[in-house]
Amino acid sequence: MQQAARMLAAAQRVLVITGAGMSADSGLPTYRGVGGLYDRDLTADGISIEEALSGDMFDRDPSVSWKYIAEIERACRRAVPNDGHRALAAMAPKFERFCVLTQNVDGFHKSAGSRDVIEMHGTIHQLKCTRCHWQATVEDYAGLDTLPPACPDCGGVVRPDVVLFGEMLPQRAVSQYEQALGEGFDLVMVVGTSAVFPYIAAPVQQAAMQRSATLEINPQRTDISDYCDVCLQTGAADTLVALQKALQAAA
């Protein structure tokens, strides 16, 4: 922890990459595993949750996808940003740049006050029509009259502006990310993600080759652990709060 705090204090440009573990302390349920919504191999419809939440399924039968989208949103509705989200937001002003790239769709980083955020998989709070240009921001799905919702402008099917299984990443988010990487970072911090996606692992591997600082916060070792200068096998929120306090003390 002391080494991680020193690395953070010495940095000027920081990239933070967050995954599901970042929001675990907010009480968000995972799809699978202990406490998951879908611990069984198949959903009640006899298909996997990955198939139910796939782009192909949404195109074929959006009512199936919306059934599980709404179920997940309902389970997460009372959750709020945790101390880890707030710690990252509090750290940001101390750096030349403090960019947060998240795989999460809960919108918690922005709600907690982070400004430089790339939501690579979108956000459940943004809805858009699949036929026209209508879009809207909602606090939750309690006000949706029907599932799937119909566009108020053209009657087309509405969907959350998130990346479903099998879909391409949004070009705008990818462009933001590529531009940020091109400008460079002297510390890459990965929090609460297994880093299975190449776009997560690549900046860590690149930073390691360029001898930039690398830090991982995750209860288990991952495929990128060997590339990190420091691996803190702990939960996200408490660790980030401790790092934020250490950074404050060093100022």
Image (cartoon, rainbow, N blue to C red):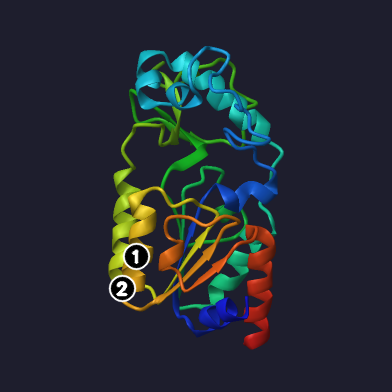
Residue 135 percent coordinates (x, y): 43, 33
Viewed as shown, does residue 58 lie left or right of 4?
Answer: left
User: What crowding class fits label 1: few (fewer than 14 Cα within 10 Å), some (14-19), or many (20 or more)?
Assistant: some
Location of mark 1 (residue) = 205
Residue 210 percent coordinates (x, y): 31, 76
Image quadrant where residue 226 sits? bottom left
Looking at the picture, tell me which residue is in the foreground, 175 or 165. 165
Distance from Cα at disc 1 to Cα at disc 2: 6 Å
Location of mark 2 (residue) = 209
Residue 143 circle label: none
Q: Secondary structure at mark 1?
A: helix
Residue at image location 71% in from the left, 38% down from the top: 78
Residue 58 percent coordinates (x, y): 40, 20
Q: Amino acid at mark 2?
A: Met
Q: Secondary structure at mark 2?
A: helix
Looking at the picture, tell me which residue is in the foreground, 14 or 114. 14
Q: Amino acid at mark 1?
A: Gln
Looking at the picture, tell me which residue is in the foreground, 48 or 240. 48
Residue at image location 31% in from the left, 67% down from the top: 206
